[in-house]
Every structure is written in structure tokens, then in C-alpha cells.
Image: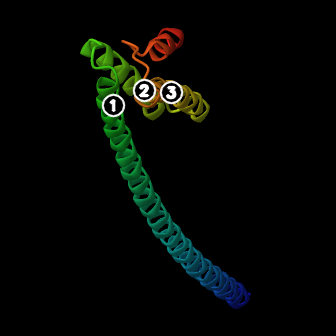
Amino acid sequence: MSFQIFRTLLDSIKLALGRDYETRKKSLRENTLLKQQKAMDNAQISYELEALKIKFSEQLQRIKAREARTTLDYKEFLEMIDEMKVQIIEAYPDMPKVMALVIHQHAKRLIDDIWNNPDEQMQSQCRAKLSQFIQVVYDDTTAVLFDNQHSKIPSKTLYQIEKQE
């Protein structure tokens, strides 16, 4: 009988060890699968991060190029406004030069309003105001230069400034 108890005990130990072995083997397989999944996830994350870096780098280059063009446009507008001031002074030689400066500063402010306004709709409204103002200045100066009118000041232009303020 004691031999039987010993044998049952030995079988139980073998069974327990066998189960423990199977459990460890299963656990190792699961750990291996988890490690593989983690490696694949890390590779996917690395890929996505690299793709985002490239995307953002390209976007940054486009933004820089667009801003450089915008700055060049802004400088060109300012140069043209300077030319407009010279034309006004030539068209109205008897006018106080400070009036030409007021007209110049108004045009510059309209340009600044376009460039400094982040709202596209407001920029569009500012462009319309600038276009309208430049048209009035053009009409005033060409009327004097080509029609031989001898007005002392560009009255329509000055009226337009008052109206826009």
C-alpha cells in the first residue's frame, strides 16, 4: 500500500511537472508572439514617424517658399507705391509735398492691412479698397498729365482717403 501511495505521488509530481512544462512552453510562445508584435508595431511607428517628418519638412519648405514670394510681392508693392508718390509730385508740382506723403502713407497702410490680416476675407476686402484707391489716384494723376488740367491738388484722391478713414 505504501508503494501504491508512493507511485500515485510520483505520478502526480510527473503530471504537475508536465503541466508546468506545457504552461511554460505556452507562455514562451506567447512572449515570443508579443515580442514579434511589439517589433512590428515599433517598425510601423518608426515608418509613420519618418513619413510625418518628410511630410512636415516638405510643408515647411513650401511655406518658406510661399512666404518668400509673399515678401517679394510686398516689397514690390511698396516700390510701386514709392513710384506712385513720385508721379503724384510730378503731376502736382505746386502741391505741398506732405500731401503726397499722406497719400503714400495711406496706400502703404492699405498694403499693410492686406499683408498683416490673417483672415482671407478681410484681405480680399483690403485688396478691393487698395484697388479702388489706386484707381482714384491714377484717375487724378492722368487727368492732370494728359488733359492739361491744372489742379493744385489731387482732390478725388484726398476725398477717397477721407472716405476710407
Q: Which residue is mark 2?
A: 141
Q: Amino acid at mark 2?
A: Thr
SS class, disc 1: helix
Q: Residues within 10 Å of mark 1 (few under 14, many from 20)?
A: some
Q: Which residue is mark 3?
A: 139
Foreground residue, 56 or 30?
56
Q: Amino acid at mark 3?
A: Asp
> Which of the two discs, 1 and 3, labels the residue nearer the N terminus?
1
- Residue 96: image quadrant is top left
Foreground residue, 37 or 137?
137
Residue found at the very far left of the displayed protein: 97
User: Where residue 55 sits: x, y (%)?
Assistant: 49, 64
Q: Which residue is mark 1?
A: 87
User: Where residue 46 sits: x, y (%)?
Assistant: 47, 70
> What separation in Å lies between label 1 and label 3 (alpha carbons)?
12 Å
> What separation in Å lies between label 2 and label 1 (alpha carbons)?
7 Å
Residue at 38 percent of width and 54 percent of height? 64
Residue at 50 percent of width and 71 percent of height? 42
User: Where residue 107 sits: x, y (%)?
Assistant: 41, 25
> Which of the two discs, 2 and 1, labels the residue nearer the N terminus?
1
* CB under 8 Å between discs 2 and 3: yes
Q: Does 26 sit above or below residue 143?
A: below
* Residue 61, numbered circle: none
Q: Going by the image, does 52 lie left or right of 34?
A: left
Foreground residue, 112 or 52?
112
* CB under 8 Å between discs 2 and 1: yes
Q: Amino acid at mark 1?
A: Gln
